[in-house]
Image (cartoon, grey):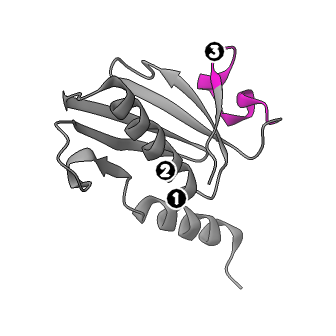
Amino acid sequence: MLPPLLLAAWVLNAAASEPLFRADSKSLAGASAMDVVVREVERLPRASVIEVDVTTRGSSVGASFFLFCSLRRLAQQRGGYRYVVMLDERPKPNQMLVGFLRNAGDDPRTLGPAFQGAPADKVEAPL
């Protein structure tokens, strides 16, 4: 049996070695003019910082749908989460802090200091 400290280091190293999420609209089939990239730039225990790079938006509905589907895939990848909470322009401009909730009743404040008292929209991300 591994000592607790060694076990904790092993778990943290395993989580840190997972590749960060990336979704690119150009990799999808179709002849869309949309060119949007969603990149996870930091991974926290129950949250991710993402950046959305828009070269060509295409239709606003298409770009919004792509962003929502990308967040849904990220939530699934991070542990099958069904609900997310999003804070725009955090931690800095052009970034979004996305927290992962176990259920609709979860209090976003349990996700960490950045979610304390911050206005947040809970979104169900059906799987």
Over which residues does the magenta segment extend? Answer: 106-121
Instruction: Give the quadrant of residue 57.
Output: top left
Image disc number at residue 114: none
Instruction: Give the quadrant of residue 111.
Output: top right
**Would you say residue 115 sits in the magenta stretch?**
yes
Circle 2/circle 1 CB separation < 8 Å: yes
- Most extreme residue toward the right is 105
> Which amino acid type is shown beneath numbered disc 1?
Gln
Quadrant in which the N terminus is drawn: bottom right
Spatial CA distance of label 3 from label 1 is: 25 Å
Mark 3 Cα-neighbour bin, 10 Å: few <14, some 14–19, many ≥20: few
What residue is shown at x 59% (from left), y 24% (from top)? 114
- Most extreme residue toward the bottom is 1
> Which amino acid type is shown beneath numbered disc 2?
Leu
Spatial CA distance of label 2 from label 1 is: 5 Å
- Whole-percent x and y of residue 55? 16, 30
Q: Is residue 119 above or below residue 110?
A: above
Instruction: Give the quadrant of residue 60.
Output: top left
Image disc number at residue 77: 1
Label 3 sits on a secondary structure element that is: loop
Mark 1 Cα-neighbour bin, 10 Å: few <14, some 14–19, many ≥20: few
Quadrant in which the C terminus is drawn: bottom right
> Which amino acid type is shown beneath numbered disc 3?
Ala
The residue labelled by disc 2 is 74
Circle 3/circle 1 CB separation < 8 Å: no
Mark sitting earlier along the chain (2/3): 2
What residue is shown at x 37% (from left), y 54% (from top)? 20
